[in-house]
Image: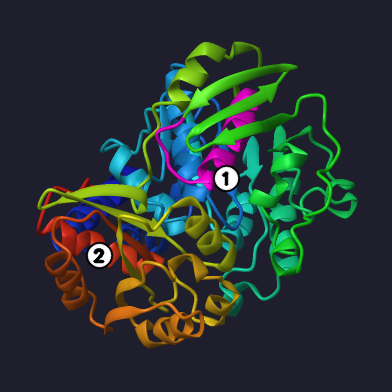
């Protein structure tokens, strides 16, 4: 009776929050306070347990890929679709999926978790499998230097019960110090040596040459990106190469796809239907705000999330500004990270030819100053996102648009766009 009462209360709070346009994590925070065991008790029902994805960049999109690949294998999957990757976000997502008695009808949970919050999660709920994506400088006000982030990911790996997948090209994840104490099976994914310069590690981003070092040693069950041409790629495993064409744009998403394949192969084991896995991979569409395309007044408007130097650099490298009007929106709320000094580690030279139409967000003038130093022209700067978006959409009518935005800026922009056009609701 108590569980049913708590579930109904939580669902009520979730419904009210949605009506008021509130944050996706609020109902989770509520249910965590009144029942700290809600998440662990609910996830314990799953016959295939929990699969956890963490790392600095790519969590939301990679999680979406893994979910759709596992669903393509015939599994029923629970996930935190909104990308709210604190434990309270998982609790909020559960409230949307459980019935009135607190029962969760799913085979497996695939969850993305913030590195720091994942540490607390795995001590209470041990995942069966985990995928560790990368270690990059991100939110220095929260995490400090990246060796600390690597330590957090190591704790996740230590608490994983059945298998661990790592990015072998990340020097901290593939180091002997990271791997030596792990007792569960470890598999890896990465890119061919000829492609390493496209996917620099955090260390390599600050070198003055194109050299990025050597890829780590291949493992017998390694998954590797062999070639890439736009959205076309060749992925190799089990001594065979498979051609895929992704709907997802951005070279970083091809790397994420390789990680997703490696994880799904580990989770499914001998049950894997390879043809269905590759077919599902080619149907995955962008996660919300991560290269998402929205049609506004007949024009395409792409939202590209940027939150640290590596992510912003790869996004700029992935999308040509030619033929597009560009807007940049940068906030410094807690979820974005308060420290915006990382903007100075991003090279904006690629925008010199076209300039930037609009700069906005709480830190609009910091962003504008950074663009000035790279001699990138700007037409309009305004900290008010609603006013800036209106200017961007009205003054560039008839031209495709692209907005590079920090996390909370992206959430605000999606809400503003939803008042103008159809925007997918993610619950």
- The location of residue 365, given as percent across then percent down, is 37, 87
Q: Residue at x 41, y 46 (%)?
A: 80
Q: Residue at x 86, y 37 (%)?
A: 217
Looking at the image, residue 216 sits to the left or right of residue 98; the answer is: right
- Tell me the CA gap for discs 2 and 1: 26 Å
Compare residues 291 and 37 and report the one nearer the observer: 291
Q: Main secondary structure of the magenta part?
A: helix
| Image vertical order of residue 159 relative to residue 120, above or below | above
Q: Is residue 259 magenta?
A: yes
Compare residues 410 and 11 and report the one nearer the observer: 410
- The location of residue 235, given as percent across then percent down, is 63, 26
- Read off the magenta span: 246-266
Looking at the image, residue 294 sits to the left or right of residue 40; the answer is: left
Looking at the image, residue 44 sits to the left or right of residue 72; the answer is: right
Tag 1 or tag 2, which sits nearer the N-term? Answer: 1
Looking at the image, residue 66 sits to the left or right of residue 426; the answer is: right
Q: Is residue 263 visible?
A: yes
Q: Residue at x 64, y 36 (%)?
A: 129
Q: Quadrant of residue 364?
A: bottom left
Q: Which residue is mark 1?
A: 53
Q: Residue at x 77, y 63 (%)?
A: 209
- The location of residue 194, given as percent across then percent down, is 74, 40
Can you tell which of label 2 and label 1 is closer to the viewer? 2
Tell me the element at label 2. helix
* Within-10-Å neighbours for mark 1: few <14, some 14–19, many 20+: many
Q: Which residue is mark 2?
A: 413
Tell me the element at label 1. strand
Q: Is residue 229 magenta?
A: no
Q: Is residue 2 visible?
A: no
């Amino acid at each position: 009776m108590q569980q049913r009462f708590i579930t109904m209360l939580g669902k009520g709070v979730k419904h009210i929050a949605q009506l008021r346009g509130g944050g996706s994590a609020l109902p989770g925070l509520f249910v965590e306070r009144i029942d700290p065991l809600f998440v662990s008790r609910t996830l314990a029902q799953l016959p295939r347990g929990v699969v956890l994805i963490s790392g600095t960049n790519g969590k939301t999109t990679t999680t979406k890929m893994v979910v759709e690949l596992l669903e393509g294998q015939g599994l029923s999957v629970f996930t935190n679709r909104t990308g709210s990757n604190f434990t309270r976000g998982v609790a909020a997502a559960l409230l949307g999926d459980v019935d009135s008695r607190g029962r969760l009808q799913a085979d497996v949970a695939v969850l993305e978790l913030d590195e720091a919050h994942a540490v607390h999660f795995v001590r209470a709920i041990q995942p069966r499998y985990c995928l560790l994506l990368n270690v990059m400088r991100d939110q220095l006000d929260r995490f400090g230097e990246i060796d600390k982030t690597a330590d957090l990911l190591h704790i996740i790996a230590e608490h994983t019960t059945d298998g661990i997948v790592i990015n072998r090209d990340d020097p901290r994840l593939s180091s002997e110090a990271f791997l030596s104490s792990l007792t569960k099976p470890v598999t890896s994914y990465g890119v061919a040596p000829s492609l390493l310069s496209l996917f620099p590690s955090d260390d390599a981003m600050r070198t003055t040459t194109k050299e990025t070092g050597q890829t780590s040693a291949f493992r017998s069950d390694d998954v590797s990106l062999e070639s890439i041409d736009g959205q076309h790629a060749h992925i190799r495993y089990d001594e065979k190469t498979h051609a895929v064409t992704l709907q997802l744009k951005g070279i970083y998403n091809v790397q994420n796809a390789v990680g997703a394949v490696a994880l799904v192969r580990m989770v499914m084991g001998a049950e894997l239907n390879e043809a269905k896995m590759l077919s599902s991979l080619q149907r995955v569409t962008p996660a919300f705000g991560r290269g998402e395309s929205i049609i506004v007044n007949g024009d395409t408007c792409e939202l590209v999330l940027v939150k640290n130097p590596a992510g912003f650099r790869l996004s700029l490298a992935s999308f040509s500004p030619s033929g597009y009007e560009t807007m940049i929106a940068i906030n410094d709320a807690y979820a974005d990270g308060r420290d915006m000094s990382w903007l100075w580690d991003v090279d904006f030279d690629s925008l010199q030819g076209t300039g930037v139409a609009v700069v906005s967000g709480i830190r609009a003038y910091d962003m504008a100053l950074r663009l000035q130093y790279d001699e990138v022209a700007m037409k309009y700067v305004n900290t008010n996102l609603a006013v800036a978006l209106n200017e961007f959409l009205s003054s560039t009518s008839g031209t495709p648009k692209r907005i590079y935005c920090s996390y909370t800026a992206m959430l605000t922009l999606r809400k503003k766009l939803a008042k103008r056009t159809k925007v997918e609701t993610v619950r």
